[in-house]
Amino acid sequence: MKKTLLLLCAAFCAAQTMFALTIEDGKFYTIANRNDVNLYVKDTGNEIIQMGALDDACYWQFIATDNEGCYYVKNKKTGRYAQQCSTVTEVNVTMGDEPVEYRV
């Protein structure tokens, strides 16, 4: 769960490179833990992003911003956004109502 969003983005970028994935407007994506494909990044409605079994809380939309390669990361079930993550280790990524831009 620690540094989940960085893992999320790293996993997403790896998948994008490996499979030539294009982020499409209006589509939703799941992000699995590459060491355990039964664990997915999810928003359970708590303060932080968590990992768990696949369910409706595991679907994410990458909403393009005006900056190339940048997106807001929005959860389909809760409608909340991943917030800015810390560069310090052992810090969980929080969720919030305001979009925060991420470079993917």
Image: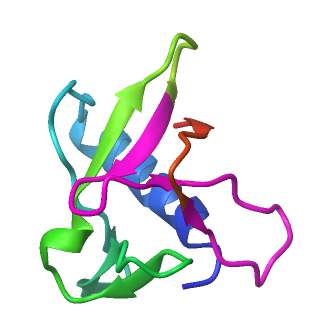
Quarter-of-image position of residue 31: bottom left
Give the residue displayed 63% in from the left and 82% down from the top: 2
Q: Position of residue 57 (x, y in %)?
A: 23, 71
In the displayed structure, does residue 89 sit left or right of residue 75? right
Give the residue displayed 23% in from the left and 61% down from the top: 30
Quadrant housing the N terminus: bottom right
Q: Is residue 33 magenta?
A: no
Main structural element of the magenta stretch: helix, strand or loop?
A: loop
The span picked out in magenta is 71-95
Q: Position of residue 104 (x, y in %)?
A: 52, 37
- Reply above or below: 52 against 78: below
**Which residue lies most toward the right here?**
88
Give the residue displayed 18% in from the left and 46% down from the top: 28
Quarter-of-image position of residue 5: bottom right
In the displayed structure, does residue 36 sit left or right of residue 27? right
Give the residue displayed 32% in from the left and 50% down from the top: 15
Q: Position of residue 56 (x, y in %)?
A: 14, 71
